[in-house]
């Protein structure tokens, strides 16, 4: 899917493919292991799987809904690659 907010996005080099929606993405979000175990698309693996940011949020929203509570996250950039 192209990103309507970024001109030339389709030509941008992507490194990852989401294992839920199949979209390519280039920003990796690091999730705490215990939480990742609840949302991973590959529960049969130990910590495996790839999800784009959109699918991570959809799965976190589902968890929050199932828990019946509002949740919030602080997004920080840990390091440069
Ligand atoms: Zn996705």
Image: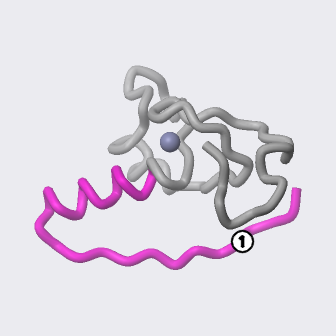
Sort mark 1 into few (<14), some (14-19) or many (20+) by Cα contacts within 10 Å. Answer: few
**In the rendered image of this protein, does residue 13 appear above or below residue 78?**
above
* Residue 74, percent from left and from top: 52, 78
Residue situated in front as seen by the camera: 4 or 42: 4
Q: Is residue 20 magenta?
A: no
Under circle 1, the secondary element is loop
Q: Is residue 58 magenta?
A: yes
Q: Quadrant of residue 64?
A: bottom left
Q: Residue at x 49, y 28 (%)?
A: 46
Residue situated in front as seen by the camera: 39 or 8: 8
* Residue 49, percent from left and from top: 53, 31
Q: Which residue is mark 1?
A: 77
Q: Residue at x 14, y 56 (%)?
A: 66
- Image quarter of the N terminus: top right
Residue 6 as seen in the image, left or right of residue 41: right
Residue 5 as seen in the image, left or right of residue 19: right
Q: Residue at x 51, y 30 (%)?
A: 19
Residue situated in front as seen by the camera: 9 or 26: 9
Q: Quadrant of residue 81?
A: bottom right
Q: In the displayed orientation, state which residue is furthest to the top.
A: 44
Q: Which residues are magenta?
A: 56-81
* Residue 36, percent from left and from top: 44, 46
**In the rendered image of this protein, does residue 59 appear above or below residue 46?**
below
């Amino acid at each position: 899917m192209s990103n309507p907010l970024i001109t030339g996005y389709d030509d941008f080099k992507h490194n990852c493919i989401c294992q839920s929606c199949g979209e390519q993405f280039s920003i990796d979000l690091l999730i705490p292991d215990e939480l990742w175990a609840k949302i991973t698309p590959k529960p049969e693996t130990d910590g495996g799987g790839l999800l784009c940011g959109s699918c991570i949020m959809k799965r976190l929203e589902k968890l929050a809904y199932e828990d019946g509570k509002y949740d919030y996250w602080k997004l920080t950039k840990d390091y440069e690659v």
